Image (cartoon, grey):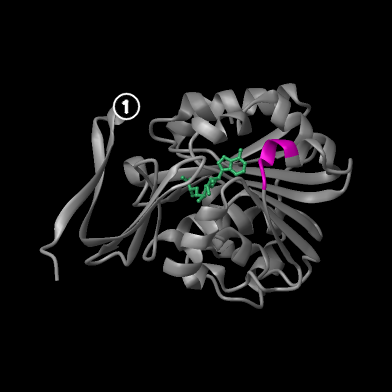
Amino acid sequence: MTAPTWLYENFDPAGSAIGFRVTRKLDEVQSPFQKIEIYESTDWGNVMLIDGAMMVTTRDNFLYHEMVAHPALFTHADPKQVVIIGGGDCGTLREVLKHAGVQKAVQCDIDEQVTRMAEKYFPELCASNDDPRAELLFDDGIAYMANCAPGSLDIVVVDSTDPVGPAEGLFNKAFYESCFRALKDDGILVQQSESPLVHLDLINAMRAEMGKAGFATFQTLPFPQPCYPTGWWSCTLARKSGGFEFREADARAKAFKTKYYSADLHKGAQHLPPFVAEALGD
Ligand code: SAM
């Protein structure tokens, strides 16, 4: 047993850090794309870092995975065809496949090593990988979306790392144009959109790029995420037209369990704090 020590991700722009007390490093892989590390912690289960940034902990990943999946799936009238770009830890895939109406969910992560590490250290997140509706691809999500058949998708979930390195190209007009083309007219693009406390400029820039690609309406939903910088995160939904009324009755009657997402929570998340609403012009 190693003496516990503190593992930090320093977040310079906010002058803050996220830390976990860890007992040992369980694994480390340098893939062709990024460095993936896994630590065992005293209180948060296992912790995955990519290039030094906290990605997933056993204890709090449900917050993020449920919020990038369920609001979009309960907003779309009848989601059947779903693509997840990134999401290599497979937690978002698991949430998406809880919806019985989903016929196919393709997960396209650039880095197979992330999934191999998740299978070993976060097996609960990979519980639906063998679902016959799931397809796991290891490819660049930018190329994958560029080659998707036009009008073939109901939902695109962008569950990516921060907009640096391989994920940089997942935050610009060219990528959003591919998503726009691949989505049906009533389709929804949803993307993790960083912290509403310190990344409002980034969220506005994302929305502007989505707008240039043709998307017309946007909704940003904040949620807590202790393992990410500032502890407060968000996802942003975009549609070609129309609003974001969700299938509240279906969300209330859902046949699967969630730990954070609920119809009431979804409703509450739609009410942005005034400073966020003002910054986003909502
Ligand atoms: N929840 C996390 C967050 O907000 O920081 C994201 C976790 S998920 C593990 C991020 C995944 O995006 C990684 O597995 C990474 O390999 C993948 N990724 C980054 N750039 C990509 C690209 N261009 N195409 C597909 N996947 C990409």
Q: Which residues are magenta?
A: 139-143
- Residue at 81% x, 61% y: name it: 80
Q: Residue pushed farthest left?
A: 3
Query: Which quarter of the figure has residue 139?
Result: top right
Q: Residue at x 39, y 65 (%)?
A: 58
Q: Is residue 38 above or below residue 222?
A: below
Residue depicted at 61% across the width and 45% down the height: 110
Quadrant location of residue 103?
A: bottom right
Q: Would you say 22 lies left or right of 66 here?
A: left
Residue depicted at x 71% and y 54%: 75
Q: Where does the image place residue 33, in percent across and percent down from the top left?
A: 51, 40
Left or right position of 82 against 209: right
Evaluate whether residue 216 shows in this view: no
**What residue does disc 1 label?**
13
Question: Would residue 127 be found to the left or right of residue 210 on screen?
Answer: left
Is the distance from the Cβ of mark 1 to the nearest ligand 1 atom less than 8 Å? Answer: no
Is the stretch drawn in magenta largely helix, strand or loop?
helix
Q: In the figure, 259 relative to 188: above or below?
A: below
Amino acid type, label 1 = Pro
Q: Front-most of 140 and 75?
A: 140
Q: Position of residue 271 (x, y in %)?
A: 53, 45
Local crowd size for mark 1, using a 10 Å CA cut-off: few (<14), some (14–19), many (≥20): few
Q: Position of residue 252 (x, y in %)?
A: 63, 70
Q: Is residue 235 magenta?
A: no
Quadrant position of ligand 1: top right
